[in-house]
Amino acid sequence: MLLLSIAKNVFAASGQPNTSAMHDLGAATAHISLQATALGLHTHSMAGFDKDKARSSFAIPMDYDIGIVTALGYLGDPQDLPEKMRGPELAARGRKELADFVITAWAEPWKTS
């Protein structure tokens, strides 16, 4: 299943801008991913899609911002993937070091010691 995430960028009651709409959308997506994992499902969120085509295909009004698409489902067998996709799927996963993205003061990297 593919989920298209959208958020209303103005409050219905006041018509004022909803500046936290995309933050709230991200939090909702994170919770969907956590619940999916609890149910034995997997998610993969993607930004690489045509937002204009999504807007026109689903007649999404301009007072909604389009966020991401999230694939939701069960993992398949990596051996069933095309060869060019199999390698990255089976490759060892790595994480960035905390000092690469955690700061203690503006532009001052976090130090582990």
Image: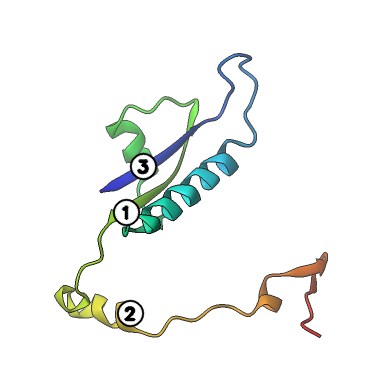
* Three-letter amino acid code at the position of disc 3: Leu
Across and down, in percent, residue 62 comes to 46, 26
Query: Considering the numbered disc 3 on the image, is that residue within a helix, a strand or a loop?
Result: strand
State the image quarter where residue 82 is shown.
Answer: bottom left
Dot 2, crowdedness within 10 Å: few (<14), some or many (≥20)?
few
Q: Tell which residue pokes out farthest to the right in this image.
A: 105
Residue 71 marker:
1
* Three-letter amino acid code at the position of disc 1: Ala
Across and down, in percent, residue 7 comes to 49, 34
Across and down, in percent, residue 44 comes to 37, 59
Query: Going 21% across and 68% down the picture, which residue do you hit?
Result: 76
Q: How is the image coloured?
A: rainbow
Badge 2 or badge 3: first in the primary sequence: 3
Residue 28 marker:
none
Dot 1, crowdedness within 10 Å: few (<14), some or many (≥20)?
some
42 is higher (above) or lower (below) than 92: above
41 is higher (above) or lower (below) than 16: below
- The residue beneath circle 3 is 4
* Three-letter amino acid code at the position of disc 2: Pro
- The residue beneath circle 2 is 88
